[in-house]
Image (cartoon, rainbow, N blue to C red):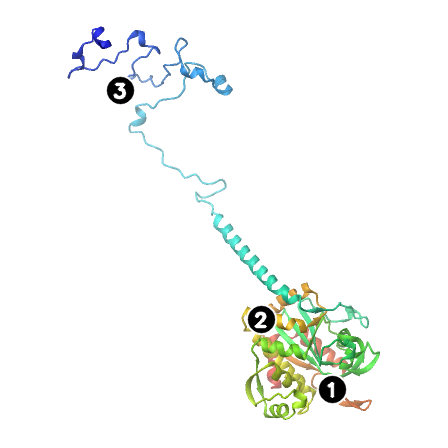
Amino acid sequence: MPRFENEGYNPDKNSKGFEPDRTVPADEDYYNYSPIDLNFNNRQAHDDIVFDNQQKNTGINPCDDYPRPPAQQKDYTPGEQRFRSERIEDFGNAQREPHKRRDKPGATGGKRPPKKGNRLSVKKKILIAILVIILVIVGSIFPVLGRINYDEQKENESISSSELEHSAMVKNILLIGVDARSSDKAENSRSDTMMLVSLDMKHRCIKLVSFLRDTWVYIPALDREAKLNAACSGGGYQGVVDAIEYNFGVDIDNYVVTDFEMFKVLVDSLGGVEIDVSKAEAKEVTNHPKRYGKVKLKSGKHTLTGEQALAYCRIRYIDSDFGRTQRQRTVMSAILDNAKHSNPFKLYKMAFSSAPYIETDMSKSGIMKFVLQAGICITGDMHQTKVPFEGTWNYSTAGGSSIISIKKEENKNQLIDYIYKKSSSELKELESKED
């Protein structure tokens, strides 16, 4: 029979209208449980503290089986206030304080400091892009650099560097063209073309200066006066650099040597160059196959192949060396202009194909620096002139051969002024007057 019936359990207590019996038998009240008053309104105003009714010295606390950490055992004593309960007033009409935004330390005016996350992200993206570009450039230029022929750079012993005009904003490269390149030493050949390519980074332009090969000057390598193109046979490519520096007072940073084969490859890799050919020029090339290798030209504006452009540059008999160097500068200007408007893939093809035909005293790092400097100037104008300048020379003879006698100091001063001092706008004005 159920326990409650044996103890006189009254079932009426559970009927409607009677509250259920919530008392606990005394013999089963292990924790000395006392009912909790759930009616908050009946509490005394001061009765706002809740005690743990299981924390009595005589009671049983199941938690005692699990020792507290030393910090808790030290700070806590049975029966003390553990936490504060909510008062009835706390749920009344008390006004809550308005929410205040907590600004970061150092912020003023109640405004949040600008977030740096996006800025750092943008900087990282820019840095990554720059690194990728550098890797692409380096990765593409190193195969080209490995195909170039390098010479040891030498000092000019015939003149002190302090006597030469120099500027950190100008890079002078002497372009030397020879008739052929074989196993013969440079001393056994004569320079067919001598053109100074000046990168004027101050005025953001490129200046081309041709030196006529019949110019009569002192050749340090020969220790005597001779035609300028004889400097190569006397002192090699460095001998040409020394002669120009000695006679004209400009500092030449490096030289680049090319032959006719390289010239043809260079032009063909760019898809040709557009040149306006005169009737006399077309007739000279077409009617003399032994001189120009059976090349044919037509008068008018045409896109010339590498072989045709080379024949055009070599024309001399219809006028003079002045006309010849003018044609060389015209083709060089067309090559630079073509390169300026070419895509990177075409430029890489041009550099890779031409590299084996190039010899220079520039280092690999020097070439890379030169390419970057050229990028500053190639978007600007290109100007060209020749040495000797107008009114500073006359034809003469020496040793039974025709030469160009020059006024050395006048040419030296005009060349320094042209390369280092004249701006692009000033040169344009001079060129318009000459036309």
Which secondary structure lies at badge 3? helix
- Which residue is painted at 26% across and 20% down in the image? 41
Q: To which residue does mark 3 refer?
A: 41
- Tell me, yes or no, whether the two marked residues, 3 and 2, touch with CB atoms within 8 Å: no
Q: Label 2 amino acid?
A: Leu
Label 2 crowd bin: few (<14), some (14–19), many (20+), radius 10 Å: some
Q: Position of residue 303 (x, y in %)?
A: 55, 83
Q: CA distance from mark 1 to mark 2?
A: 40 Å
Which secondary structure lies at badge 1? strand
Quadrant into which the C terminus falls? bottom right
Closest to the camera, between mark 3 and mark 2, is: 2
Front one among 430 and 229: 229
Q: CA distance from mark 3 to mark 2?
A: 92 Å
Q: To which residue does mark 1 refer?
A: 393
Q: Is residue 221 left or right of residue 2?
A: right
Q: Position of residue 262 (x, y in %)?
A: 65, 76
Closest to the camera, between mark 1 and mark 2, is: 2
- Kindly indicate the quadrant of the structure image that contains residue 295: bottom right
- Which mark, residue 347? 2
Q: CA distance from mark 1 to mark 3?
A: 121 Å
Q: Is residue 150 left or right of residue 119?
A: right
Front one among 252 and 308: 308
